[in-house]
Image (cartoon, rainbow, N blue to C red):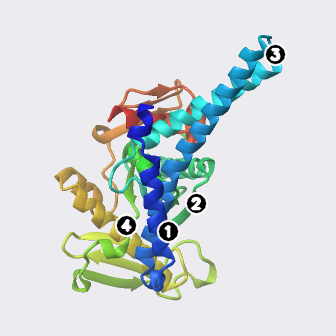
Amino acid sequence: MPSEVIFDTASLRSEIAELESHTNQPGFWDSPSEAQATMRKIAALKDRVEPYERLRKALDDIEELRSLVELEKESDLAMAKEIERLTTAFLRDLDEFELRTLLGGEHDASNAIIEIGAGAGGTEACDWARMLFRMYARWAERKGFDFELLSETPGDVTGYRNVAFKISGPYAYGYLRSEHGVHRLVRISPFDAAGKRHTSFAVVNVMPEVAESDVNIAPEDLKIETYRSSGAGGQHVNKTESAIRITHLPTNIVVTCQNERSQHKNRSTAMTILVARLAELERHKSEDTLRQLRGDLTSADWGRQIRSYVLQPYSLVKDLRTNFETGNVQAVLDGEIDELIGAFLRHR
């Protein structure tokens, strides 16, 4: 079959075996970041091969059942329903596999680091950032991916001014880079006693997780400061300088983290985010992206939106890049964004 030539499972299996042999070599874990990168590559390759092999088996099972029906030359309702069930599942998995074939970018197989910043809209925007945070957490849960909060700056009343988190799973970045940009919400504000309609914005910045060894950062280019954390945290708040602020002097990128009581953990998290931002900056030299990556993510406004979520006076989510739209806004906010992601990947 032509697909056998296009999708060379034998070569991929050979590459997996070669990489797995390296993992058994002495000293493999001497460099944890490189070892983890190798393990992620193995997982990504398996994630390409195994779905294809499952599809081949599923198709063979369907064909075998069809052949049995033809041989018996009788209508078997139970068997017909089983063929229908298997065919529906096969087409769903085939659609998912098709999307995977569109994820061939250098870092598409990587984990995703996401930052959400509240834009225009004050308390409304902070709450909108919280809603988006929940949407991606639910999406990760549906996919069986790991979700880890990295840092947060709460809003004055509710939600987040800024929040950063990591989603770990095969091709997490490849899928979620479709979310990079400004998201607009229109709804009746729960914070407005007059019940007026409000428009809010939040900017979503999506970056691949990159090993620190893959980015050249000179120690003298970093300004590392400690300060007392603020916000929730009980008796330890403001008593120890565990919060970390790292400034990359050549680019003036600033990353802060105060989530943990441990200064060491906060520094590690801040470096993870900084490395991801610098790697993203290397790939995107345009002035527009540079502005988005610098400092706090607050450049969310009308002219930069990628997607609109309208709750009132009607229900509609519309992606302005692909023109894909759906009226089931609540399902989208509950993490059902695969159709939006798929439309973006096919549109590119």
Residue at image location 81% in from the left, 16% down from the top: 77
Which one is in front in this view, the residue at disc 3 or the one at disc 2? 3
Q: Which element is circle 3 on? A: loop
Which one is in front in this view, the residue at disc 1 or the one at disc 2? 1
Left or right: 20, with 141 as reference point: left
Front residue of 49/225: it is: 49
Residue indicated by mark 1: 20
Residue indicated by mark 3: 76
Tell me which amino acid carries mark 2. Answer: Asp
Whole-percent x and y of residue 225?
Answer: 35, 84
Residue indicated by mark 4: 210
Q: In the displayed structure, would residue 291 be above or below residue 326?
A: below
Tell me which amino acid carries mark 3. Answer: Asp
Whole-percent x and y of residue 137?
Answer: 57, 53
Q: Neighbour class for label 2 at 10 Å: few (<14), some, many (≥20)?
A: some
Where's the C terminus, which quadrant?
A: top left
Q: Neighbour class for label 4 at 10 Å: few (<14), some, many (≥20)?
A: many
* Lower sequence index among marks 2 and 4: 2
Q: Are marks 1 and 3 in contact (CB under 8 Å)?
A: no
